Image: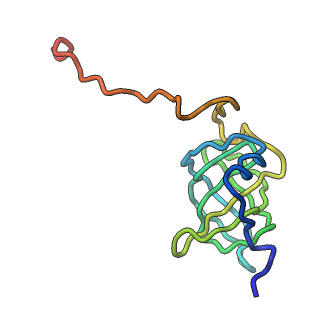
Amino acid sequence: MADPKDSIPSASSDQAADRRRSMRVHLAMPIIVRGMAGTSRFQEQTQTVTVSAHGCLLRLAAKLRRGQEVSIVNPRTAEELTCTVISLAQTEPGKMEVGLQFTEPSPLFWRIAFPPEDWDPSERKLPSYQPPSPRSRR
């Protein structure tokens, strides 16, 4: 029988969006995760899938459980924060998609500027390719 603590509640995307406290940004950022996997200490290098002021989503091979505390390290700054595992989902063989929540909101941990709440990604202008002019090839 499955442990109810490890089950992930299902919700429509509209309901999930209403519960979010901060903007999520898709960002593949290198990160180090440290903690306990069973009775053994582990340290795993990975990268984020999404980040927010309240935590991140990433993929790990380490076997964690919901409610467990781990630490994440930003290798660029060596800053380390304690997090709680809030969600687990099997995404590929040997890896789990893990949602981590900071013990306190820490938007500066990522060293990025989060977009404003009214930002609409569909309105973002994409760079267009401009071939070099023949005059600039001298």
Q: Residue placed farthest to the right in the image?
A: 104
Q: Is residue 20 left or right of residue 132?
A: right
Question: In the picture, residue 69 is in which quadrant?
Answer: bottom right
Question: In the picture, residue 63 is in which quadrant?
Answer: bottom right
Q: Residue placed farthest to the top in the image?
A: 135
Viewer-closest of 24 and 58: 24
Residue 53 rendering spot, x and y as whole percentages: 73, 42
Viewer-closest of 20 and 63: 20
Q: Is residue 74 above or below residue 137?
A: below
Q: Is residue 68 above or below residue 38?
A: above
Residue 138 rendering spot, x and y as whole percentages: 15, 14
Residue 57 rendering spot, x and y as whole percentages: 65, 55
Q: Is residue 24 above or below residue 86?
A: above
Q: Is residue 59 left or right of residue 54?
A: left
Viewer-closest of 111 and 65: 65
Residue 103 rendering spot, x and y as whole percentages: 83, 52
- Residue located at (69% from left, 40% from top): 23
